[in-house]
Image (tube, rainbow, N blue to C red):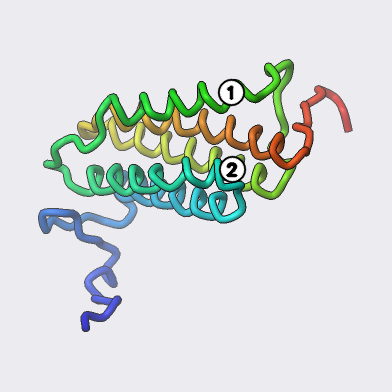
Amino acid sequence: MAKIYTKTGDDGTSGLIGGSRARKSDTRFCAIGAVDEANSAIGLARAASPSEIASVLAPIQGDLFEIGAELADPKAKMRLTAEHHANLERAIDEFEKGLLPLRAFILPGGSEAAARLHLARTICRRAERAVVALAEGTQVSPHIFAYLNRLSDLLFVLARTANRLENVSDTEWTPGAE
């Protein structure tokens, strides 16, 4: 059985698909790591979410692995397509039907599931920024940008939905309130 540790990264580098190596501080690894962190946060949210939300999050975790694989292979063919972010848009539209229209900014929180989904949303936004930084020096599929942007929107809607399903009110932000 192969061991989990290889010691090849002890010099501060890590391998990419195809065999090349780069510094672990390289923007490519920052982007891959941020996407991985978003995936982990979604897994945490999924564990606390009602089944109708958890079932939507499961395939998203697979999509995020696809994004990570594409980012890890500088010569990769595009794995994500417009259909992937269209699926997110359909989910957003479906879940928004059950929500009251927004009248103010919503503070992250509420039920445990909603709080975890809000955290996943902010981590997803960080992953999006890391991928944009990577794209300043290398080509990145525009489908990845669109997907991460839609995903953070979906996570916001799912957080509001989790609160609704658990009969917890969203907390509206009131400027200047203590």
Foreground residue among 30 and 65: 65
Name the residue at 38% across, 28% down: 87
Looking at the image, residue 56 sits to the left or right of residue 112; the answer is left
Looking at the image, residue 13 sits to the left or right of residue 173; the answer is left
Foreground residue among 148 and 43: 43
Q: Secondary structure at mark 1?
A: helix
x%, y% of residue 42? 50, 48
Q: Indicate which disc residue 117 carries.
A: 2
Residue 8: image quadrant is: bottom left
Q: Is residue 30 above or below residue 148?
A: below
x%, y% of residue 1? 21, 83
Residue at the right extreme?
178
Neighbor class of circle 1 (other Cα within 10 Å; few <14, some 14-19, many 20+) is some
Q: Nearer the viewer, mark 2 or mark 1?
A: 1
Q: Indicate which disc residue 96 carries.
A: 1
Give the quarter of the figure containing the C terminus. top right
The amino acid sitting under disc 1 is Glu
x%, y% of residue 144? 31, 32
Name the residue at 71% across, 28% down: 106
The amino acid sitting under disc 2 is Leu
Q: Secondary structure at mark 2?
A: helix
Name the residue at 61% across, 47% down: 50
Residue at the bottom extreme?
1
Neighbor class of circle 2 (other Cα within 10 Å; few <14, some 14-19, many 20+) is many
x%, y% of residue 120? 54, 44
Q: CA distance from mark 2 to mark 1?
A: 15 Å
